[in-house]
Amino acid sequence: MTSPDPVTRGIGRRGILKYTAVGAVGVSASALAPNGAFAASAAVGGDSAQYLRKLYQDALDEGGKLVVWAGGSSPQQEVRTREAFVTAFPGIDAVFTVRYSPVQSALVNRQLALGGLEPDLVQIQTLYDFDHWKAQNALLPYRPPGAQAVFPQYRDPDDAYIGIMTRSFGRVSNSALLTEARAPRDASDFLAPAFRDRIVIPDPTAEDAILFAFYLVTQKYGLRYMEQFMEQRPLIVANAGATTASLVSGERTATLAHIASLAPVPGQPLRYVVPRTDQFMSWPQTVAIFRKARHPAAAKLYIAWQLTVERQRGGLQWPTRRDVAPAGGWKPITQYNSRLNGFREFLRDRAAVERYRALIKTFVAP
């Protein structure tokens, strides 16, 4: 793909969502000592386990709290992550606040300018923000164990930020209604008569990642594709949660760009596939610690924990570490048609992103 006329990111639907969980269940037993605290396992080597124990104690000594601002469209989005973390490290009060990534970054910029910074770290998909904060000297450099195994495209060379998980908007269908052979994979498949009134998509103008997924499609097929696609009368919904609900209910059967687990989830009929020939979008969910963080040890503990082999193996989609195999028999992300740094390159030219958003809005808004 040629360097994109970067086009992606919109503030779209800007509801502010917050979730603070209490209690914790469901972390694997291998990560727990008899008293519930973190212990070494086959997946966490002795040196790493010792390092995490030291960080854990430091986190308790600094007050036992962690404040994470995460990007997302649902207040429930980080519930399992929070539960796993506080179970592995009892005594750490972890508060996760979930908002759309553009909202999170704007609020961080406001607080950096006015004082009173709330989050210890951010975990968002507006990747250009990390370079901006680095240039402001607002980020605390940190190199966790395993950082050298992370794809170079997913980490800052000066350790200001790092990708802890790979996310992708691929093709997703209802496996109870469509056999694997009939499920659409390339964008051209969605134009078949069988998919008229059967497609659902999140509003591609509401946020950058979905916009980039459509950018890749129109780069290959041209803008005429958007006319043909809209003739299929797709249901356009607010966000990923609404897309999932439409697919699971059977209201619609397939979507062009959506996140789902690589491995089937018991009781949920969602099937994730990558295209046959189309390039598809992926990006590293990236984290960084602020220099003004009130709980830097807890923030370091969180990042180091996310990069353990056990956490990398158990992620929703691909790991960011090159030395960890994806679950479920999938190949490494590098063996599929998705540029590791494509989304970041797309995001960098904000004017071009907004021009493309306005262009796509002419197709979907009416």
Image (cartoon, rainbow, N blue to C red):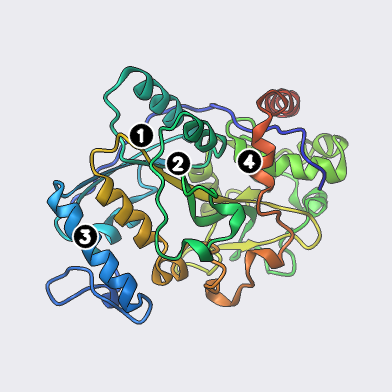
What type is the residue that disc 3 sits on?
Tyr
Instruction: Label 2, secondary structure: give it.
Output: loop
Q: Which residue is outermost to the top?
A: 114
- Which circle's residue, 4 or 1, is located before the other in the chain? 1
What type is the residue that disc 4 sits on?
Ile
- Which circle's residue, 3 or 1, is located before the other in the chain? 1
Q: Which residue is more in the foreground, 193 or 322?
A: 322
Badge 4 density bin: few <14, some 14–19, many ≥20, Cα 10 Å: many
Residue 15 visible in the snapshot: yes
Q: Which residue is mark 1?
A: 17
| Distance of label 3 from label 2 (alpha carbons) | 27 Å
Instruction: Label 4, secondary structure: give it.
Output: helix
| Distance of label 4 from label 1 (alpha carbons) | 20 Å
Instruction: Label 3, secondary structure: give it.
Output: helix
Q: Which residue is more in the foreground, 181 or 169?
A: 169
Residue 72 badge: 2
Q: Are marks 4 and 2 in contact (CB under 8 Å)?
A: no
Instruction: Label 1, secondary structure: give it.
Output: loop
Q: Is residue 98 above or below residue 88?
A: above
In percent of width and height, residue 102 lies at 49, 30
Q: Which residue is mark 4?
A: 210
The residue sitting at 12% across, 72% down in the picture is: 35
- Which circle's residue, 4 or 2, is located before the other in the chain? 2
The residue sitting at 42% across, 62% down in the picture is: 307
| Distance of label 4 from label 2 (alpha carbons) | 13 Å
Q: Are marks 4 and 3 in contact (CB under 8 Å)?
A: no
What type is the residue that disc 1 sits on?
Leu
- Which circle's residue, 4 or 3, is located before the other in the chain? 3
Q: Which residue is mark 3?
A: 56
